[in-house]
Image (tube, rainbow, N blue to C red):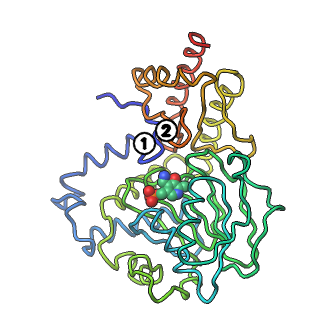
Amino acid sequence: MARVYNFSAGPAALPTEVLEQVRDELLDWHGSGMSVMEMSHRGKEFVGIAEQAEQDLRDLLKVPDSHRILFLQGGATGQFAAVPLNLLGDREAADYINTGNWSKKAIAEGKRYCEVNVAATAEADGFTRVPAPDTWKLNPRAAYLHYTPNETIGGVEFHWTPDSGDVPLVADMSSTILSRPVDVARHGVIYAGAQKNIGPSGLTVVIVREDLLDRADPRTPGVLDWKRNAEGNSMMNTPPTFAWYVAGLVFQWLKKQGGLEAMAEVNKRKADKLYRVIDESDFYRNPVEKESRSRMNIPFILADDSLNAAFLSEADEAGLKTLKGHRSVGGMRASLYNAVSEQAVDALIDLMHDFERRHG
Ligand code: PMP
């Protein structure tokens, strides 16, 4: 069986060992005689799987006792609405930092519920950097400060945690969660769609400080209400059980790799070597300023746009898949999530050198 090198931005590559374990346990989970897919979410087998996954995630991210972890549905997009609905309380405004496409989507949804103050935006620079914090114009009436630590499309990443003072800091960590350690305690809320570094799509992880669970708008749909979901241990309604189980296997795999410090080291090495190839040639280019470059999603363009199709087709033939850039920016994008091996990055680099030699 051949497994390709998959550089998809999401749903993205999963560790082969995890998929093998899923296969081995598919029809009969631990002698239960049934698949996890077929189990009641309230039975002791699934409750055990769910609790173990939550504990492993807590260990990996060092989530303090002050914060609850929720396993929900609706994607990060659902949380674009859940954030204002749960956090505005008696306030009417919120601060957002705009670093690209996903920030913009969060802002557009936020505007449906409150007065959005875009405290800083990098749009004038084509979203090629994180705006310097001394230029941010925060609203003293804001209920929270929202930022996107990693822009999956533009490849712009915060390598530091913003200081929001007493205002809860909210992060859409969809495409950077579990790629490195995070200071969870400095965040009021962290949320992420699972389909990049966590597991299959259909699961959304929300980490929320317990004292923020008292301010939801009474009209908040129950499935988006963090307090109701916390009270029901994320089983207020039927959770995405199979995705939760696979996520749990990914958490165990991450622990076996040495946890997030170890992952951060490997991820830095993978990204550094790809950026080096891009920077050392005039043939490839990445427009993002060095201090703001993403370690998870690396967009690059060719000096000659007309060669894109040839590059992608050669990559495809070599077993290097899903390298096409997002339709809004074109070119290429290599997503280097945890499950993308160093070997995959080396194979991509070999192709890039070879392609440049023949077409450069
Ligand atoms: N935020 C970011 C940073 C993303 O990368 C994505 C998905 N690519 C989303 C939000 C939307 O996530 P979902 O499709 O899970 O709603």
Dot 2 alpha-carbon crowd within 10 angstroms: few under 14, some 14 to 19, many 20 or more:
many
Q: Tell me the element at label 2.
A: loop
Q: Amino acid at mark 1?
A: Ala
Give the labeled residue for mark 2.
340
Q: Residue 121, percent across and down?
A: 71, 58
Question: Is 96 displayed left or right of 56 in the figure?
Answer: right
Disc on the earlier residue, 2 or 1: 1
Q: Is mark 1 within 8 Å of ligand 1?
A: no
Can you say whether 170 is above or below 268 in the image? Answer: below
What residue appears at the point 53 percent right and 70 percent down from the top-left corner?
207
Can you say whether 79 is above or below 328 in the image? Answer: below
Q: Quadrant of the N terminus?
A: top left
Q: Which residue occupies the foreground of this view, 119 or 266?
A: 119
Give the labeled residue for mark 1.
13
Q: Tell me the element at label 1.
A: loop
Residue 316 seen in this snapshot: yes
Q: Amino acid at mark 2?
A: Val
Q: Quadrant of residue 73 in the image?
A: bottom left
Cα distance, mark 2 to mark 1? 7 Å
Question: Is 26 displayed left or right of 119 in the figure?
Answer: left
Q: Which residue occupies the foreground of this view, 221 or 309?
A: 309
What residue appears at the point 38 percent right and 55 percent down from the top-left corner?
201
